[in-house]
Structures are given as C-alpha cells and as structure tokens.
Amino acid sequence: MRNRISPSALKHTLLALLMLFTVGLLASCGGHDDDDDPPPGATTGSLAVSISGLPAGVNGAVTVTGPASYSKLLTASATLNELAPGAYAVTAANVAYGTGNLAATPASQQVQVGAGTSASAGVAYAATAPLALALQEVASGLQGPTFLTAPPGDSRLFIVERAGRIRIVANGSLLPTPFLDISSRTTTDGERGLLSMAFHPQYASNGYFFLYYTDLIGNIVIERRQVSAGNANVADALASVQIIAIPHPGFNNHNGGLLSFGPDGYLYAATGDGGGAGDPAGNAQNTNVLLGKMLRLDVNASTIAHPYTIPAGNPFVNMTGKRGEIWAYGLRNPWRYAFDTTAQLLYIADVGQAQREEVNVAPMGQAGNNYGWDIMEGTQCYDSASCSQAGLVLPKVEYGHDSNGGCSITGGYVYRGTALPELAGHYLYSDFCSGWLKSFTYSNGSASAVTTWNITNVGNIVSFGQDAQKELYLLGGSGKVYRIVRKQ
C-alpha cells in the first residue's frame, strides 16, 4: 500500500523549504550574518552619576547633555545606558531647602564616554548659609501709601495713596505728577480712602485699570479708568465707568480693600463686613448683601448701561434671596488676598476682632466657601462657648493678640520671583501693629515651615506689593516703600 502524506505534514514541509531558500538567498545577496554581530554594548557606553548629600525627600537637579542632542534631568543617582560615544556635560543646579540652599559641587564637569566602557561622575550637595532678608528703600515721602502694583510686563511701579492719588516710580525715581488724582471723590475718615487698583490683563492694548475706593459718604466704589492717549504716565481724568457701588452705612471701618484680576480673567473684590464690633448687622453670613464677601465680576465688556455681568460659575447665580456677585462669604475685613497661580491656590488674610488673626487657603476654583465670621474668629467660636462649624472653611494659619502676635494681619503674596529662589512657594505676611515679617509654605492641606524673618525698625506695615516681575514690596505707615531683597 502506498504511503500518503497528510495535508498538514505537507504544509509544514513546504514552509521549512521556503525558509531555507530565503536564508540562502539573503546570504548570497550579502544579507545579515549573525556571526558578524558586535557583542552587546560594543558601540555604546554608559555613565553612572552619583548624587549625594540630599536630605530625604529632596530632589537634586543634575542635567546630563551630550551627542545627538541628548539631554536627561536626574533628581537622584542613576546609571545612563546605551549612550553614544563622546563628551557629556554634567551640570548641577543648587536646590532650595527650607529657607536656605543646597549647593552642588562641582557645578559643571565633562565626562568622556567610550564605546563598550562605563564612565562615572559625582555630584555632592551641601547646605549653604540660610537665606536672610533685608529691605531696600525704593520710594519715600508718600502720603499714606496703601498698595503697589504694575501692569503686566511693565518696569514701572504704581503706588496708591489713600488720599486718592496714584504715583509712579520710573527708573528708580518718584515722578512728581500723579498718574491719577481722585482726592476730591474720597476721604481718609477712619479706614476710608483709595485702597487699591488693578490693571486689566490686556492693559497694554486697552489701557483699562480699575479702582477700589470709598466715596464721600462711605460707599464702596469699584470704577474703571483709562490711561490717556498721549502720555503713558498720566491717566485720562474724564474716562470712567462705575462698575458697582456697595452701600456701607453707619461705620467708617471694615471696608475690605483689594481689587485684582484672577487667572480666570474675572475681577475679584474683597469687601469688609460693614464695620462695628462683632458684625452688628450680620452682613458676613447674609448672602443677600455684598459686605463681608469676596465678589467675582465679569468686566471685560463693561459699558455705562451694563457695567458688569455675573460669571456663570458663581455659586449663587439666579438664586432667590442671594446675590449672584458673591464668590465666597463669612469674612470680617479681608484687607489683602492673593492668587498663587503656580499652586492654584487662593490665600485670604482676614483681620480678626479682638483675639485671633487668620490666613485662609483654598483652591482657586472652589466657589461658595463660608470662612466662618461671625460664627468663628479664627478657629475659635466667637462670642459663645460652642458653635456649629459644619460647612465652614477654617483658617490654615492663625495667631493671637499677645506680646508675640499683633493686632491686625497684613496679607501678602506667595513669592514667585527669581531674585530669591530659596523663597519660592513661601506665603509672606505681616501685622500692622507688630511690623514683623513671617512666611509659611502650604501643601497637602496644611501649612509648614513657618518662619520669622529678621526684619525690624520698619514700623506699621500697611500693605504688600508685587511688581510685574513678581518681586515683593512692603509699604510702611511712614510713607516709605521697600523692596524685599537678599541680605548681603
């Protein structure tokens, strides 16, 4: 009987013959020959980078660059493999640690990597002297300076005087002619006056800036103004649009005072509770009035007929008995607040009643927060032995009215400038009465690294300021303005 080959066996035989034919064809045509392969790594090299001296949880900053546009950032020791032969630069940057620096040695070195070999480089970090701060006077002879700011990308400083004038420091000199003078429209009675200003994010193209002041009868007024067409150092005295006027009857204190544009492009304003001890009118917890609040307004298409609209994301939009302008409430006298766009956080320094001063910290996009006044003063129940804290946002930092504390917090900014890299991420604040300078960092829901800086003999600290380069300033009750700098 003749043996028959099954279809399956025949298929495998044909595949084997095809593979043998292909291999022979490739060999005859000069194809790949495994016998000629170099040993693994024979055409490349490796570089072992050792990084030492870093405390636990602190990252280094070592960059390795080389042939073929190679670039690698290392935060800890590592071995880099399959590197093309050639010269590699190892550059190490200092890193911030606490209020000091960890310095890298050497700062730069060059290492030759050869084919089939392993090279090495070492970087050691060591602590340098901790950062010390000093104050550099930039202006004097001012009449009650209350605020300092600058348009985006501008080298000038704009300083607000409480009596109603805005002064300019240009090229280190205080210009004699005010940028704007509205002294006939405000008063310095009590805590009243011209309290702050804010430049529109597109100021360079539209020339708009906004004022926060109290008028002659005490109402809080937010107003749009415009720079003159022919002189960048003088505002147009006639071009104005009133955005909103908020009644503030009965008392001449607790006016709030800060106006600023948030990173969302909307205009924010922080108002006081209306004055008097203990919020006698109950304004801060009343969401049908605009006192004791943070407001958020859309002013990007302001006209006299329609000076603002209410952003759709505001928490009380179209709610009966509630004002849609409100972003947050339960504030006593939030004289100063600050956005930190790097960490996406909002800091509100709220002046206390008689015992506690506080700093509140919350995500920038968190709407409808109730910061507790007058249920709470800081983390303590106000005017009662116990109280319900349900739904309240309590402060992250507070201090008392004692010999080591103060009487009225002056909120500042999170440092994001370049002159003092060790200070990056620190929120700076002061106290009007005590005049000290302190800071803390904030992460994972809590404050840490609380630091008292050796700043003395400044007197009353009225406000902080920030220029276009994000360097920070202190405004003193003596009429002087100081830049915060490194102590030499």
Image (tube, grey):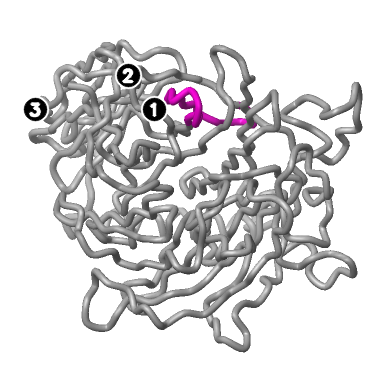
- The label nearer to you, 1 versus 3, is 1
- The residue labelled by disc 2 is 100
Q: Quadrant of residue 18?
A: bottom left
Q: Which stretch is magenta?
A: 430-446
> Dot 1: within a 10 Å radius of its alpha carbon, few (fewer than 14), some, or many (20 or more) residues?
some
Q: Position of residue 368 (x, y in %)?
A: 75, 53
- List the residue tagged with mark 1: 459
Earlier-in-chain disc, 2 versus 1: 2
Q: Position of residue 470 (x, y in %)?
A: 34, 47
SS label for mark 1: loop
Q: Which residue is mark 3?
A: 110
Assess disc 2: are there few (<14), some (14-19) or many (≥20) residues with their C-alpha within 10 Å of its C-alpha.
Answer: some
Residue 149 sits in quarter? bottom left
The quadrant in which residue 8 appears is: bottom right
Foreground of the two, 119 or 126: 126
- Secondary structure at badge 3 equals strand
Instruction: Relative to 251, say whether 388 is above or below.
Output: above
Is 377 on the left-hand or right-hand side of 408? right
Disc 2 from disc 3: Cα separation = 28 Å
Q: Is residue 82 visible?
A: yes
